[in-house]
Amino acid sequence: MTTERVMASGERGAARDPRARRKHLALAAIAVLASPAAWLASLWLSWGVQDFTCSAAASADSDAPAAGLFVILLVMNIVLLVLAALSGVVGWVLARHSRAATQQAESDGGNGESANRPGVLSFLGVTAAVLSLLFCYGIILITANPLVFEVCS
């Protein structure tokens, strides 16, 4: 056997391994849920931190630390934006991996069941990528708020 044939049979064996498939499906599910969770965290934390800081400063009759709050909001939202974008990248990679495994199984004359399972992984991967785009846009809009309006105005 050539090394290419051994590697290909090893890749097929890994693709058909139920534990590896479950790990990929779990990773795809996490990728689907990560970008909405990042958007929700961005929305809650931005509002909560800003409201708490501005209310505390107003109740103490002092000026709000606008510059520090601006930096905190900006850094926090950029970190959540990166998290949401990474979930889309992971989803896209999983979808491409799934499509390659499906094509490999079909070209090897695999049965319908082995070619059918990667379809779910592909769907979840594409869904994660699309959700990532949508929720990244939402996080960008939340991040732009302190850039446009004054903090604690």
Image (cartoon, grey):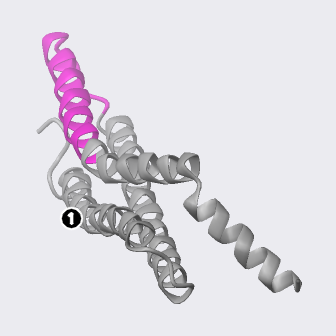
Residue 60 at x, y = what percent? 19, 10
Q: Secondary structure at mark 1?
A: helix
> Which residue is more in the foreground, 151 or 114?
114
Image: magenta residue range: 39-65
46 part of magenta stretch: yes
Residue 135 at x, y = what percent? 23, 58
Answer above or below: position of 30 versus 120. Answer: above
- Please report the residue visible at 31 percent of the width from the left and 53 percent of the height from the top: 32
Residue 15 at x, y = what percent? 58, 64
- Please report the residue visible at 39 percent of the width from the left and 46 percent of the height from the top: 30
Quickly name the residue at label 1.
Answer: 134
83 part of magenta stretch: no
- Residue 45 in the figure: left or right of residue 102: left
> Which residue is more in the foreground, 74 or 140?
140
- Please report the residue visible at 14 percent of the width from the left and 52 percent of the height from the top: 149
Residue 150 at x, y = what percent? 17, 47
> Which residue is more in the foreground, 27 or 86?
27
